Amino acid sequence: MNPTPITMAGESTFNTFSYLLNGAYSLAKSAREDPEGSNYRRISAVLFSAFAIEAHLNHIGEVKLPFWSVVEPKLPWRVKLELIAQQLGVALDYGRRPFQSLSDLFKFRDKLAHGKTETAESSYEYQRYPGDDFGNLEPEWLKKFWSDDAVHRIREDTLEIIKLLHAKAGLDEYTLHTIGSGAFAERKEDTA
């Protein structure tokens, strides 16, 4: 006999940026461990990293800037970053890590998010054996993140930026890696 379920009610918080950071880590680890389809997982890890940065900017904006809900939908990622950095007293140096990675990261994200079919002249050496790969059809911008080292660098820079902004915003460090939390209590049915 199954026990009667109890209805629990309360409030929960889902930290999207933390979910995406964890996803990027998991995808990169999986790509390192299993070569089949690994480039798709590397690309996904890079995309999750870009999404994590923007989600974290939105998280800080909501917490620290009372006008965020008005301006956020109209702002590109760079303006969000610069506004939050100014409010938190963070100096941005796009010529050095970790901020150096951002321009390439978001160009890459935008290429995939707003994807367009591309046609270009190309050539390759035909090897004349069964299973010849018929050349490499993927564009160079896509191959940029096909190495574990490139993905690691993006993930490392992403985490460093998020940690810096999180600390400057005075937010608890534990929430960096907490996907969700909540408080619930049994909801009693009103029998009156």
Image (cartoon, helix red, strand yellow):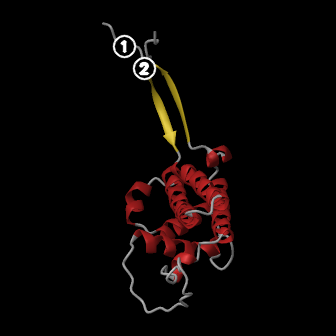
Task: Pick the quarter of the image with the C terminus.
Answer: top left
User: Which residue is at the front of the view, 157 or 57?
Assistant: 157
Q: How crowded is mark 2: few (under 14 residues within 10 Å), some or many (20 or more)?
A: few
Query: Would you say residue 92 is visible in this rendering?
Result: no
Residue shown at 65% from the left, 45% from the top: 172
Report the side of 119 relative to 129 (left or right). left
Q: Which mark is residue 189?
A: 1
Q: Which mark is residue 107?
A: none
User: Which residue is at the front of the view, 190 or 140?
Assistant: 140
Vertical placement of residue 140 versus 54, above or below: below
Determine which residue is flagged by label 2.
7
Residue shown at 69% from the left, 70% from the top: 149
Residue shown at 57% from the left, 50% from the top: 18
**Regarding mark 2 in the picture, which secondary structure is present there?**
loop
Q: Which of marks 2 and 1 is in front?
A: 2
Residue shown at 42% from the left, 89% from the top: 120
- Residue 74: image x %, image y %? 38, 66
User: Which residue is at the front of the view, 35 or 2?
Assistant: 35
Amino acid identity at mark 2: Thr
Vertical placement of residue 152 versus 174, above or below: below
Do the residues under discs 2 and 1 have CB atoms within 8 angstroms? Answer: yes
